[in-house]
């Protein structure tokens, strides 16, 4: 058993690390905010996703700076960022890479692997629902397993590895919606809404002048990996753990409380794991050493809504998933 003195030293080390890392993360958040205006909630949730070691699905109409956000994150966090524009004719090899046959000067032939754009630390999958299910699966498998297999050979992806995928909610013609099992690979589904009037006024002046503000590096990959390790070491109080369990379990159909009339299927244990990591990451982003129940309530919707479906009768009554999650939150709030 560890001595009380040893435990105290470990706690002191965590506190010191947390203070230092929180300062660097806040600097990164401020650097992003100088380029992306009016999307504070989106920036915060995206950073929480990355600090949790996860992937995010950004949902929003065109022109809301989703692509620019990913580019800015790459620069600010010091990550190697790449972008893939998903189209119906995109093949798995266009993402993963392929083996090519090389011939040497002596006439000897051998296969050589040419890495695809998935070999990045931050990958933007633009309009992911435009590609065929086969191509979507190739990317989603890489997201889950952190490696790919081509011609029987395993190739590990860089660390850290994060995918930020975008989806246009309006244009559904010629798209292949992501299956539920694949949606579950995303830690959060983040809605990118229109900016308010003041933010849009600022966008007009900042982006149409002779000079445009450019993103500046505030961190690097090593600092980010250290921050992700620290997130997993932050303590979580019993009340917060119970709130996570109560909320996720309440989001599943249950004949005892009548929720099966509203909810067709609900989140699995991966949702609880995601919420547990995300509340710690949010606390660290705010410079706190432990998450609170408010963190659970604030992150419930982006973590749960893509892991649930309503029954036909609930949809017929005009109920929506965000509306049901708000109702569930009142039970633990």
Image (cartoon, grey):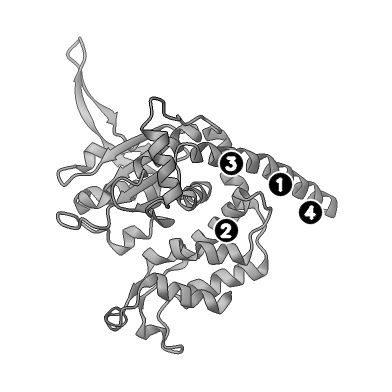
Residue under pointer 4: 2
Pointer 2 local density, CA inside 10 Å: few below 14, some 14–19, many at least 20: many
Residue at the spot 44% in from the left edge and 61% down from the top edge: 302
Q: CA distance from mark 1 to mark 3?
A: 16 Å
In the image, residue 56 lies at what x, y percent? 41, 51
Q: Nearer the viewer, mark 3 or mark 2?
A: 3
Going from N to C along the chain, the mark reached first, 4 or 2, is: 4
Going from N to C along the chain, the mark reached first, 3 or 2, is: 3
Q: In the figure, residue 324 lies in which quadrant? A: bottom left
Horizontal relation, residue 13 to residue 280: left or right: right
Element class at badge 1: helix
Residue at the spot 29% in from the left edge and 78% down from the top edge: 315
Residue under pointer 1: 14
Q: CA distance from mark 2 to mark 1?
A: 17 Å
Pointer 3 local density, CA inside 10 Å: few below 14, some 14–19, many at least 20: many
In the image, residue 84 lies at what x, y percent? 28, 39
Horizontal relation, residue 3 to residue 86: left or right: right
Q: CA distance from mark 3 to mark 2?
A: 15 Å
Going from N to C along the chain, the mark reached first, 2 or 1, is: 1
Element class at badge 3: helix
Residue under pointer 2: 279
Do the numbered discs 2 and 1 sit on residues whose CB atoms are within 8 Å?
A: no
Q: Which of the pair 111/197 is nearer the observer? A: 197
Do the numbered discs 1 and 3 sit on residues whose CB atoms are within 8 Å?
A: no
Residue under pointer 3: 25
In the image, residue 321 lies at what x, y percent? 37, 71
Q: CA distance from mark 4 to mark 3?
A: 31 Å
- Is residue 24 in view from this perspective? yes
């Amino acid at each position: 058993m560890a001595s009380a003195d040893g435990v105290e030293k470990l706690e002191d080390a965590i506190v010191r690390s947390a203070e230092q890392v929180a300062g660097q993360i806040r600097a990164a958040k401020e650097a992003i905010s100088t380029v992306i205006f009016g999307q504070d909630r989106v920036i915060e949730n995206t950073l929480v996703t990355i600090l949790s070691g996860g992937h995010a699905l950004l949902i929003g109409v065109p022109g809301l700076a989703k692509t620019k956000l990913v580019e800015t994150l790459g620069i600010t966090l010091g990550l190697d960022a790449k972008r893939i524009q998903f189209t119906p004719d995109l093949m798995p090899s266009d993402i993963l890479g392929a083996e090519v046959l090389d011939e040497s000067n002596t006439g000897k032939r051998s296969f050589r692997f040419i890495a695809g754009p998935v070999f990045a630390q931050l990958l933007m999958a633009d309009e992911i629902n435009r590609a065929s299910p086969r191509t979507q699966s190739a990317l989603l498998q890489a997201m889950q397993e952190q490696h790919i297999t081509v011609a029987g050979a395993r190739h590990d992806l860089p660390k850290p590895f994060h995918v930020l995928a975008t989806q246009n909610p309006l244009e559904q013609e010629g798209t292949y919606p992501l299956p539920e099992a694949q949606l579950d690979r995303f830690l959060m589904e983040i809605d990118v809404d229109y900016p308010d009037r003041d933010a849009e006024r600022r966008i007009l002046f900042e982006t149409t002048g002779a000079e445009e503000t450019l993103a500046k590096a505030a961190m690097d990959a090593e600092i980010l990996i250290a921050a992700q390790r620290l997130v997993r070491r932050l303590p979580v109080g019993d009340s917060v753990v119970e709130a996570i369990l109560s909320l996720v379990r309440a989001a599943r159909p249950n004949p005892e409380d009548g929720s099966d009339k509203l909810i067709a299927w609900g989140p699995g244990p991966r949702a609880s794991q995601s919420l547990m990591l995300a509340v710690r990451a949010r606390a660290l982003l705010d410079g706190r050493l432990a998450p609170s129940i408010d963190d659970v309530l604030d992150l419930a919707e982006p973590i749960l809504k893509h892991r649930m479906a309503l029954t036909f009768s609930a949809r017929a009554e005009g109920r929506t998933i965000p509306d049901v999650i708000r109702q569930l939150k009142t039970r633990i709030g």
